Image: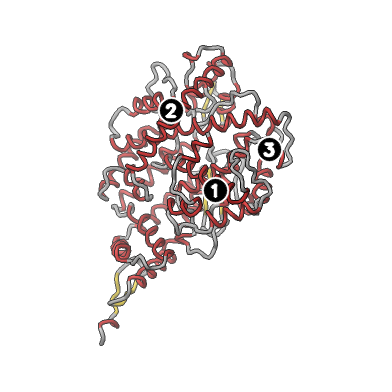
Amino acid sequence: MKVALLMAVVGLGMSGIVTAAGESIESRAGKLVEYYEKEMRPLFVERETAWWNANVTGSDADYAKKEAITNKYNEKMSDSKIFKELKEVRTKLSPKASLVLRRQIERFYLEAVEKQTPADLLKKIVAKANAIEKIFNVTRAKVGGKELADSDVKKILKESKDSKERQAAWEASKVVGANVEKDLKELVALRNQQAKSLGYSNFHSMSLELSEEKPSEVLALFDSLDKLTRDRFLALKKDIDTKLAAAYKVTPAQLRPWHYHDPFFQDAPSVYETDLDATYANQDIVKLTRDFYAGLGLPVDGVLANSSLFEQPGKSPHAFCTDINRNGDVRVLANVVPTEGWMSTMLHEVGHAVYASTYIPPTLPFLVRDVSHILTTEGIAMLFQKFSKSADWLKSMGVAVADPVAFNAAGKKLQTAELLVFSRWAQVMFRFEKSLYENPKQDLNKLWWDLVERYQGLKRPENRNAPDYAAKIHVVSAPAYYHNYMMGQLFASQVHHAAVRDVLKTNDFRNASYVGNKAIGDWYKKKIFDPGATLTWNELTKFATGQSLNPKAFVEDL
């Protein structure tokens, strides 16, 4: 019998993968993809559905289901025999093999790497993260015995002129940090244990490398952004502080974190002449969102029908978009109230939704029927959210604005302010998490406020020694993620400039309108959505814009 006909059964998981002696690497790669489709894909859908249900209901039963299916998925993904075959095939697969096949193997590999740790450790990580997320979702700030929704806290921070009331609301919003501090530190230790078992120095470094980012390059980019934005931010903050101090009848030196309009100062305060919220007070935010995307030739009726858009007990107080099955079941969780902030948020989250299996071609295989990268989907979402601050956009959408000139002036000021303020907040998050995982035993409260003072210019409250860093849910549920928001901002500016030049034939990037322009929607389909995950984030950036990711367009947008 010829050697080539001898069959060898490689024990790869419950189903097994049968390979022939001398079989081509391409054929073996194809069988790995078939394995993923058969064994992992159903568990992926079950896991995403359980995650969605837990965040919507907040119930113990749904959180238990979420934890159980996540453990099942991780256990299957951690199969060492599958990983051995995957690692060998990835190494030997020819560059001449089809792009789609190579990307499927690469994405399978990158997902599987961090699961190559003992099953009990993975279960501990899942259980700990699950428990902390539940605390976040059910905890509500309390002031004077009254329970406040997240939107109530922000309303006080935006509208109250009473510094004591503001301080009480701000401190109440941080209570969740103290509630989860112990568990979070244990989770950080478990994540580092996992990373070190796989040969990485710490979890943060591992996370970047497994998302196809080089830690040293990301740090260099953030150092560059710090230099590019520092002076302009300080000038902006001086102006903001002058206005806030006058509003609250204190001196600029007396301003503290609760005097700003967001609990973390991640958004710019509304200190300009026109109140953007007033225009949205009687508007149907969901309808405006639906109509805008429909006008681009990107209708989202199915997305909105499957979504959970308003507050309810036990539900996560935050906002996100999730692709349940990479087959068109895309959902948004939100807690909409009629404000400019929620208009912006809905444009953002539904921006994620159109750049998902809603419009990524169904002909792409499951492993690459996905966004190219975290930063690219965040970039598209942040690009679309900017329109909420434009009176011209509102007019095109059929909304009357009492004083369009004043609205546009305030909107443009706020837009620039938000980009600058967010860039500094992203510096805090990136550097805090990097240092957190490099040295988790340091004084984390001090580290947090040292970074806040340095990059955001806020003064730490006197005699406060509380784990305020732990009140940011991303540190728990989306670790080593926040830098992608900032890189996404660079991507957003760069892509927007390319779209405006290519379709609208103008360089007036700040005033360009997308409303009712299906050619713009077609450009995004062709340049961003159609490739799915067949291109890496930087390859996609070059494909869409002709250049690698860089800060030039972002700085122009300031």
Q: Which residue is mark 2?
A: 230
Taking the spot 34% from the left edge, 25% from the top edge, the residue there is 446
Residue 529 image position (x, y, % from top left): 53, 55
Q: Earlier in the sequence, mark 1 or mark 2?
A: 2
Taking the spot 50% from the left edge, 40% from the top edge, the residue there is 553
- Between the residue at mark 1 and the residue at mark 2, the CA separation in whole angstroms equals 27 Å
Picture quadrant where residue 24 is located: bottom left
Asked if residue 309 is positioned above or below residue 419 in the image, the reply reads below
Is label 3 in contact with label 2 (beta carbons under 8 Å)?
no
Residue 477 image position (x, y, % from top left): 43, 42
Return the residue found at the far bottom. 1
Task: Using the image, tell me which numbered label, if any, was put on residue 498.
Answer: 1
Picture quadrant where residue 399 is located: top right
Element marked by disc 3: helix
Q: Which residue is mark 3?
A: 392
Asked if residue 315 is positioned above or below residue 65 in the image, the reply reads above
Residue 387 image position (x, y, % from top left): 62, 39
Q: Earlier in the sequence, mark 3 or mark 1?
A: 3
**From the viewer's perspective, is the residue at label 1 or at label 2 nearer?**
1
Element marked by disc 1: helix
Q: Earlier in the sequence, mark 3 or mark 2?
A: 2
Picture quadrant where residue 274 is located: top right
Name the amino acid, label 3.
Asp
Name the amino acid, label 2.
Arg
User: Between residues 219 and 433, which one lies in front from this camera angle?
Assistant: 219
- Between the residue at mark 3 and the residue at mark 2, the CA separation in whole angstroms equals 31 Å
Taking the spot 39% from the left edge, 58% from the top edge, the residue there is 107
Is label 1 in contact with label 2 (beta carbons under 8 Å)?
no
